[in-house]
Image (spheres, rainbow, N blue to C red):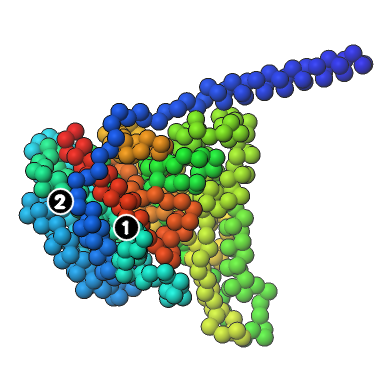
Amino acid sequence: MKSRLIKIISFLIVLVVVLGVGLYVNTLMSFKDSQLVVDSPLPEAPIDRESAVARFAKSIQFKTVSYDDPSRLNAEAFLGLHKHIQNSFPLIHEKAEHYTISEYSLVYHLKGSDASLQPVLFMGHTDVVPVDEGTAEQWEQQPFSGAVVDDTVWGRGTIDDKVTVMALLEAMETHLKNGFAPKRSIYFAFGHDEEIGGKQGAAKIAEHFKQQGLSFEFVLDEGGAITQGVMTGIEQPVAIIGVAEKGFVNLRLTVSSEGGHSSQPPNHTAAGILSQAIVNIENNQFDTDLSHSYNTFSHVAAYAPFSLQLPMANLWLFSPIVEQTMLASPSSAAGIRTSIAATMLEGSSKSNILPTVASAVVNVRILPGDTIASVKQHITEAINEPRVKVETFMENEPSQVSPTDSLGYRLIETNIRRMDDSILVAPYLVMGGTDSKHFYELSDNVYRFMMVRLDKQSLKRFHGVNEQLAVDDYIKAVSYFYSMIEDAGSK
């Protein structure tokens, strides 16, 4: 018996050693340095820095705010920005076809000499989110001042997304001063309502392009950025390029009942039935999918510590641990599953009146692979209560996943690496929504990247307090788009 036990223990020890060696070797073989090697640095665009920054700063002063209530749109602000753009970039308005869509969205088309080449589309948006009255006093500079203090431009839109609009225009104007004549046609599309879904801006622009029979070699919109200290275990800055985007759908849950006085309630009121439905939904989360996170990690894994490489290289064994670790944080959990968020509740108008109707809104962000239909089915089955009516509204399917071997992705990657080859580049899944969602039918190559640097602190300024952008970062954005326009127009 003792001899048999020794043999079993010895076998287990050998098995553990073999497994350990196998995991170690597989990890070493799984992740190679795949970062693009570039042979020339990105030159700074030949611009007058002071004048360019002044034009950018002035654009921030126009209160081009998007509200859920369209009647609150400030036409004067949008038209004032248009006038500022026209005065700032006269050559673009002289040499490029330009027009508005839905009164406030802007389209520019610089015609190329080779009609056989598909055009490219660069996007941005001119609208911004409101400034919360409760936080207005926390701003160190006025939110629409466009103040330039300590080599930083302050105000709403400096990051999201007037930086892209103004940098693109600045880069194109500079090219035209130097006699730029592209082979490939170049389009700019600047929506005016991205912050509320883009239905009157980008959606109408896409519809107009579709009617013209246009399709694009690639589309580049906002979305990704150069991040620092955001990706766990990676010390280098990482430029994340959005190659896919989550979809979204709102589900309205409604329960009707007879109502009456609260002194004679039924066992379960409409509000109670609705509450149980929400609990059921939250207790039945969607399945996880590590493929998008793995795709991002694999591009920078060579720069990660071995402790992170090991589980990601051997997901066949460690996927439950990886999943639980990522699900522990809302930010990482959103990247591996379709997310559920109950956001709005409504019941009785008075504390002693039983509700005749109780309703809730559940916002779902849909991972590619799921659909609006599958989401509704999942929610309905999770509720498992026929008294709860489920309806969908404000919906958009998740995007396709764009390739990383296309001309568009290669140009984005190359120019990032040329700007600074210490920056790692990786594709990723965009959690929020962008105007690019309206252009899936017009290109197989839709990407999301804006040339700004973001760390954990500056990420909080997105739609938050003290939104700001360093002057050097704005100049780098202009230089980046200057090179992107040149490359896209000639290849």
- Residue 107 vs residue 136, the one in the foreground: 136
Q: Is residue 139 above or below residue 105?
A: below
Which of pointers 1 and 2 indicates the residue nearer the eye?
2
| Quadrant of the frame with the C terminus | top left
| Quadrant of the frame with the N terminus | top right
Q: Amino acid at mark 2?
A: Glu
Residue at the (50%, 62%) spot, across then down = 362
Q: Position of residue 199 (x, y in %)?
A: 29, 61
Callout 2 secondary element: helix
Q: Position of residue 407 (x, y in %)?
A: 27, 34
Q: Position of residue 97 (x, y in %)?
A: 10, 53
Q: Is residue 12 left or right of residue 272?
A: right
**Residue placed under numbered mark 2 in the picture:** 173
**Residue placed under numbered mark 1 in the picture:** 161
User: Is residue 198 among the parts visible in the rendering?
Assistant: no
Q: Is residue 145 left or right of residue 1?
A: left
